[in-house]
Image (cartoon, grey):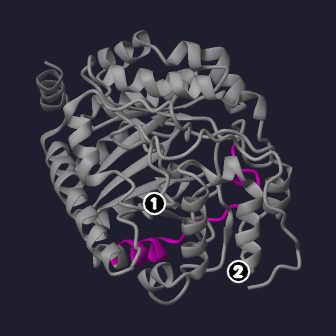
Amino acid sequence: MILPQLAYRMATTVAPNCLWKFGWNFGLKGMLSVERFKARRKKGIIFPPFLHLSVINSCNLRCQGCWVDVQAPREMVPLGELDSIVRDAKAHGNAFFGLLGGEPFLHPNLLDLLERHPDCYFQIFTNGQLITPEIAQRLRHLGNATPLVSIEGDSVVSDERRGSRHVLDRSLRGLQACLDAGLVTGVATSLCRSNIDTLLCDDWLKRLIGMGVHYAWFHGYRPVGPDASPELALSPEELVRVRRFVVEARARLPIVIVDAYYDGKGEALCPMAIGLTHHVGPSGDIEPCPIIQLAVENVHGGSFYDKVTESAFLADMREAAAEHSRGCVVLENPRLVLEIADRHAARDTTQRGTAREELLAMTPRSSQDLPGREVPEKHWMYRFAKRYWFNDFGSYPGHAAGNRPSRQPSAEPVAVTAETTP
């Protein structure tokens, strides 16, 4: 009965134009973009079907573990360049884009970008605090975006995690404005030691369902950046607990629960390593993923598609990550990331100029790749979707479950030297 309940909730709470564009632009076109991605892969060409664009570095909050230069002078990708990226990607079959920051709603032309591309779908990663009823109504009129509002705990934990006061109340106001406007709306949580007990539970999901939220996204906290706060990171046992809860909750509660790091068999995967996504930073730098702030190419001038598909740096990063494990290479072996970056003379894309030092200071730890502890999907809908449109697409030869020994992150990761050259 989960699917009928979910369908009824969507049909009765989402504005018709928003529901249509969600189903057409994101649903059907998203599936077709993955099919084109698979066809390109057979020819040895990797261009991600889903792209993440950090449109601005500025933010109104100061979160623990943030890797973005939120306190630095404002940098943002101009509307013209964002428009060019989307047009180039659309020409190769893409229709779905994740918009990140900083806080995306600080970009003065954010909604103008959505208006220019009514045939695309945008997921906006936001703290929700700048979403007024007026902005929510314009999003309803456009119909081609879903706000994903970040909630990091109860009122006390939210203030601590996000470096401000009354954070939860302000985020919930923005969330409610989205729901009142009839938008497809989600809630994301970076699970860590301080919020796993309060948010990874049926009570929290039932509260979201009662509010009218349509989907939730749980992901593990990643201790990176200048204020990594590694004490918040989840243990391997807690990562398995998260995965098991998500799989079980999907089968019993009428809310979509997103995950981006496991296939249908419960095996780990990295969206960057398999080529499903890459990232453009606020300065226009083309990065492997948001937490790898190193790049060779930039979006300024020339074909974005050509820069991505011809990048030796991106290709080397994907291949090395896939050979290393099915998990997150940044968490498991940060010095391997540096070795590859130095091999291609990749530049630090942060304003603070400390990306290399931060990676060197990291202690290798377990990521979601925990061989022998896989939790397969229970619900047929998720198994079906992942079988065709979200798996490793053959990127991990030799890393199949049961075909490798249990592995822990190396205590002595690959050495890196400043003298390494391409």
**Residue in view at x 11 percent, y 24 percent:** 4
211, 247: nearer the viewer: 247
Circle 1 packing at 10 Å, graded few (<14), some (14-19), many (20+), is few
Q: Which amino acid does label 1 sit on?
A: Pro
User: For residue 82: magenta?
Assistant: yes
Which of the two residues, 53 or 57, is positioned nearer the viewer here? Answer: 53
Residue with the most extreme top position: 203
* Residue 418 in the figure: left or right of residue 4: right
Image location of residue 380, percent across then percent down: 20, 33
Q: Give the range drawn in magenta.
A: 66-87
From the viewer's perspective, is residue 292 above or below residue 255? below
- The question of residue 185 being in magenta is answered with no
Of the residues shown, which amino acid type is indicated by label 2?
A: His
Q: Residue at x 45, y 60 (%)?
A: 397
Say if 225 sits above or below 197 in the image.
below
Rendered-image quadrant of the C terminus: bottom right
